[in-house]
Amino acid sequence: METTNSVDIRLPQTDDIDSTGINTPELEKIQAIVVVDPWSTGNKLCELILQRGLELIVVWEEGNVRSNVMKARAVIEHCRSDDSDLDEEKTIGKLQQLQHGTDIQISCIIPGSETGVLLAEKLAYRFGLPSNSPKLGLARRNKYFMGEAIRAAGVRAVQQTIASEWNEVEKFLASFKPDPFKIVVKPNLGAGSDDVFMCDSVEKVKSAFFKINGSINSLGIKNDGVLIQEFLQGKEYVIDTMSRNGHHKIIAMWEYDKRPANGRFNVYFGTKPHAVNGEVQHSLKDYVMSVLDALEVHNGPGHAEVIMTKTGPCLVEIGCRCHGGNASWYNVAREFAGHDQLNAVVDGFTSEENFRKIPDFVSHNMKYGKTVDLVAYEAKEILEVPGIEYVKSLKSFNRINLFKNVGDVLDITVDCNSTPGEIILIHEDKQQVERDFEAIHELLKSGFFILKNDEDMNTSFEGSCSSVDEDDNVSQASSYEE
């Protein structure tokens, strides 16, 4: 069933229509931005669009509705059937109806999350708005095709296969013969380190394969096939970009701090920004530019994860959308570099002049900062959170976002979706930030949360996020993607 839920659609006033029913004066057009599936960081993107005085239209792909953007001009549900071309035409028709006879002019259609990437690109292309070539559309979303596309363009790519049957995995391992034996097994369309395993034996590869294959991932997508890849040894970096007509800009560069914890090899502990002012950073910058070109990304945001191996950078994956994580990095980015990816995206789509003013990359920083991903080591009910007051006393404290509160049950942290919260640190002194970062992680081992001591309690539950009314720097968040 098709539904269009319109909110505050302003039609021409009766004074502007003559007796024949024909509009006489031209309406002054206000730019409108369409955001597809705006959850996680997409919520913050919508806020900025409205703060700029632009109109906002939200498109939710059927089955992906997660929140209600109250001040949107309209909310449209994109319904899916066996005829995707017809589905797109129907949604385009709804968008055209919103423009006809009103004061809005749709200037761009952009993804608000990973699930919105393909639909946003298709709608923008068919609407005649800035977009990317549909030829490599699947490669900009599907991790396997992504790797193969950049390899075909002569760009360093991970050794890999995708398999829906175990014998396909055995064939790859027999030909690849990793030494030492380290293989990454993960969903092909996942996000946020959901079900990503590093396996040091065939038996562990097999166990991970059958756990993932056919299951539903954190984005609500069925894992039809499993990605089997070489293990890339080295530091992992994140490069956030914005492109306009093929001109790429490195908006931010980050380094992940991932450590072994809770039986996983890659638990997020935090993220810190880098200026592009050294050999490693320039190498990463140039490499990501080549990835964007190989995938024919001409317009829109990018969020690339890259390992700096001993032989140079190699892509883990790139999302053609903004950096996720509920935009917890936003304050750090602005204090570090003076700008951020979300505003760069709005500028890039709405103003060539404003886009030109953004530097091609961050060559120096103003302040230092870090995001701290909280790590829970036990699955128990929270009785108190004394860590909040301790964290607020730290010199570099900026804000805290809690996903769990008193009365909730912690998940043991293994990926982005199971972290109980994040803390933002910002200060003029880099060492102060580092000291506070390590102090928080030490407290998380014992003392940050007071937990119910009941090992027999049932920890299988549907987690909800309770609000924390401490002050403006303590909040709650609900949905997450990295």
Image (cartoon, rainbow, N blue to C red):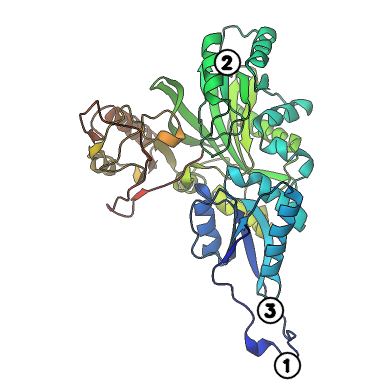
Name the one closer to the observer, 203 or 307: 203
Label 2: how many Cα within 10 Å (few below 14, some 14–19, many 20+): many
Left or right position of 8 against 427:
right
Q: Distance between the residues labelled 1 and 3?
A: 18 Å
Residue 428 pos. (x, y %): 39, 42
Question: For numbered disc 3, what is the local secondary structure?
Answer: loop
The answer to whether residue 142 of the structure is visible from this angle is yes
Left or right position of 424 against 171:
left
Name the one closer to the observer, 75 or 253: 75
Q: Name the residue under label 1.
A: 19
Q: Mark 3 points at which residue?
A: 27
Residue type for callout 3: Leu
Residue 372 pos. (x, y %): 39, 36
Residue type for callout 1: Ser
Residue 423 lies, with reference to residue 103, above or below; the image says above
Residue 280 lies, with reference to residue 28, above or below; the image says above
Residue type for callout 2: Ile
For the point 50% across and 53% down, the residue is 43
Please name which of the two marks, 2 or 3, marks the residue nearer to the observer. 2
Q: Name the residue under label 2.
A: 183
For the point 34% across and 51% down, the residue is 473
Left or right position of 11 against 393:
right
Name the one closer to the observer, 75 or 45: 75
Residue 56 lies, with reference to residue 449, above or below; the image says below
The reply to whether the C-beta atoms of the residues labelled 2 and 3 are less than 8 Å apart is no
Label 3: how many Cα within 10 Å (few below 14, some 14–19, many 20+): few
Badge number at residue 212: none
Question: For numbered disc 1, what is the local secondary structure?
Answer: loop
Q: How far apart are marks 1 and 2 (CA)?
A: 73 Å
Residue 30 pos. (x, y %): 64, 70
Residue 149 lies, with reference to residue 472, above or below; the image says above
Which quadrant is the N terminus positioned in? bottom right
